[in-house]
Image: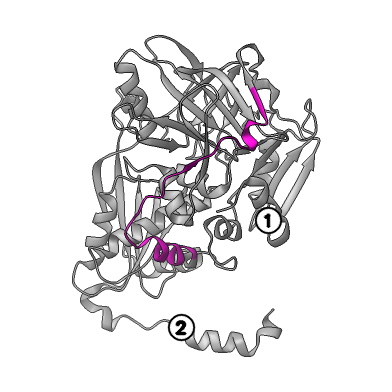
């Protein structure tokens, strides 16, 4: 685990691609530049400085873990790993008994360099971006961590939920029903209380990635990150709320998350992770900001949904590793699991299987479709296909999938309001149900031995040739 975000940035400057851009406008230009960089392979880490209207040192960062190398660096994996190899390496690390490693409390940290309270609180101190053209405002929380504590159990949860800055001391928080943050907030509201929150707007990448991932209910992301890294996260007590905040965070906004029965403000719309504006501007519960802590030269980490790919590759690697380990516990022959970033990750799940019995592919696909994740498409391929290689997957779809009998459609699964394919009449009645497609782009098991052999060369022969002709092939 990196000590802080700056240490990670320094390593990226040495081992990966880093661009510093000065003079861009917080109003759309940061988003446009980010989108352009994501259209290139291995998108660079981008740091915006001297943003229009703001002093040098008040920065915004994007594309934090949008390249395979930065994912490997963030997760402590070999820097040269990419694609399915990243998932394989990570699943080996997490396929062991989980032993929580709680955070360690320290007296102070860099995040307390500046502490603003009361009338000194001002969200506009920071160059809060307006990321997309149709966004309803400026979003300080996209690559954030929202910290809350369960009032019944004391469980500290870190989740990534979008946060819109509304005025100098008010923000709106959007957490879908069913998410841990929404469940915790509801417990306070049902008691007639406000929910204490701390919004971390910049953090080293491993802990932040945990906040984006599907860590099970009741397990703190602090404990999971400590276990994964082999060292505890350093935390300090908040300035205005009794919550542990990362000692090396960049910016932390502390306050009370108010029940919607007490007060709401209009939030949105926002360009969502599907790549569309699935929702509309609507009343949302607000955060009354009581304190802001930040480092000397603070950085907002931005992770706005962009096209053409999901720019949070690390989350997809972690979720893929967890899915692979879970499938391994129930089914033999699982050779790879990949959540395609071009398909927004979760909605497009591809699994490679070495078929061993009739119905093997269908059993695996059904298990994935029945998970809590939003797998709208589950594609099963054979073990000679790398599920992270789009060319190979498309080849399998084009040559091994017989549309008449190789696609199952399952109805009645949950989805969320931002899904652009929810029909207007269903949306108006809040009927957020969706179908799922199970696609078998693999050789039919009943005549698998008779299936024509492919012209694809074996991995050993390719490796030997690559080693022999490495100079010529470079």
Q: Position of residue 430 (x, y in %)?
A: 31, 25
Determine whether, in the image, residue 36 is placed left or right of residue 350: right
- From the image, tell me which residue sits under label 1: 12
Tell me if I can see residue 379 in this picture: no
- From the image, tell me which residue sits under label 2: 455
Which residue corresponds to the image point at 48% horizontal and 87% vertical from the top-left?
460
Determine whether, in the image, residue 347 is placed left or right of residue 38: left
Determine whether, in the image, residue 47 is placed left or right of residue 349: right
The residue segment tinted magenta is 86-115
Ranked by sequence position, the earlier of labels 1 and 2 is 1
Q: Is residue 426 magenta?
A: no
Tell me which corner region of the image, top left, top right, bottom left or bottom right, holds residue 49: top right
- How many badges with numbers are in the image? 2
Asked if the residues shown at circle 1 and circle 2 are in contact, with their CB atoms under 8 angstroms apart, the answer is no
Observer-nearest of 284 and 2: 2
Q: Residue furthest left?
A: 358
Q: Is residue 95 magenta?
A: yes
Q: In which quarter of the image is the C terminus?
A: bottom right
Which residue corresponds to the image point at 46% horizontal and 66% vertical from the top-left?
89
């Amino acid at each position: 685990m990196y000590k802080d975000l700056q240490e990670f940035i320094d390593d990226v400057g040495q081992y990966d691609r880093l661009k510093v851009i000065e003079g861009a406008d917080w109003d759309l230009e940061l988003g446009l530049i980010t989108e352009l960089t994501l259209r290139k392979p291995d998108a660079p880490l981008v740091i915006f400085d001297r943003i229009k209207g703001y002093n040098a040192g008040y920065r915004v960062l994007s594309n934090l873990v949008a390249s395979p190398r930065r994912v490997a660096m963030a997760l402590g994996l070999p820097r040269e790993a990419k694609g399915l190899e990243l998932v394989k390496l990570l699943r080996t690390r997490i396929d062991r008994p989980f032993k929580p490693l709680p955070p360690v409390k320290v007296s102070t940290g860099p995040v307390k360099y500046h502490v603003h309270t009361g009338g000194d609180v001002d969200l506009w101190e920071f160059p809060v971006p307006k990321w997309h053209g149709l966004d309803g405002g400026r979003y300080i929380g996209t690559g954030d961590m929202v910290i809350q504590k369960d009032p019944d159990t004391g469980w500290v949860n870190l989740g990534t939920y979008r946060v819109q800055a509304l005025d100098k001391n008010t923000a709106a928080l959007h957490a879908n029903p069913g998410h841990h943050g929404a469940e915790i907030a509801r417990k306070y509201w049902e008691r007639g209380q406000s929910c204490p929150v701390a919004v971390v707007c910049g953090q080293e990448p491993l802990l932040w990635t945990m906040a984006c991932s599907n860590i099970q209910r009741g397990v703190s992301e602090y404990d999971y990150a400590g276990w994964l890294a082999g060292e505890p996260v350093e935390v300090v007590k908040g300035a205005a709320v009794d919550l542990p905040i990362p000692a090396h965070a960049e910016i932390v906004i502390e306050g009370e998350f108010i029940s919607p029965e007490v007060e709401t403000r209009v939030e949105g719309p926002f360009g969502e992770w599907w790549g569309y504006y699935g929702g509309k501007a609507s009343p949302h519960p607000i955060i009354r900001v009581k304190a802001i802590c930040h480092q000397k030269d603070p950085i907002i980490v931005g992770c706005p949904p962009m096209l053409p790919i999901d720019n949070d590759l690390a989350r997809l690697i972690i979720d893929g590793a967890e899915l692979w380990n879970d499938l391994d516990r129930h089914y033999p022959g699982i050779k790879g699991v990949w959540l395609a970033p071009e398909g927004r990750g979760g909605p497009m799940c591809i699994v490679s299987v070495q078929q061993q019995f009739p119905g093997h592919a269908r059993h695996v696909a059904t298990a994935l479709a029945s998970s809590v994740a939003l797998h709208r498409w589950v594609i099963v391929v054979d073990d000679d296909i790398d599920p992270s290689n789009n060319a190979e997957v498309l080849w399998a779809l084009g040559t091994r999938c017989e549309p008449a009998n190789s696609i199952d459609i399952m109805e009645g699964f949950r989805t969320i309001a931002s899904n652009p394919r929810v029909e207007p009449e269903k949306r108006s009645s809040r009927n957020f149900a969706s179908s799922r497609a199970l696609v078998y782009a693999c050789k039919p098991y009943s005549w698998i031995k008779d299936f024509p052999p492919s012209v694809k060369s074996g991995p050993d022969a390719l490796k030997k040739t690559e080693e022999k002709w490495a100079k010529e092939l470079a």
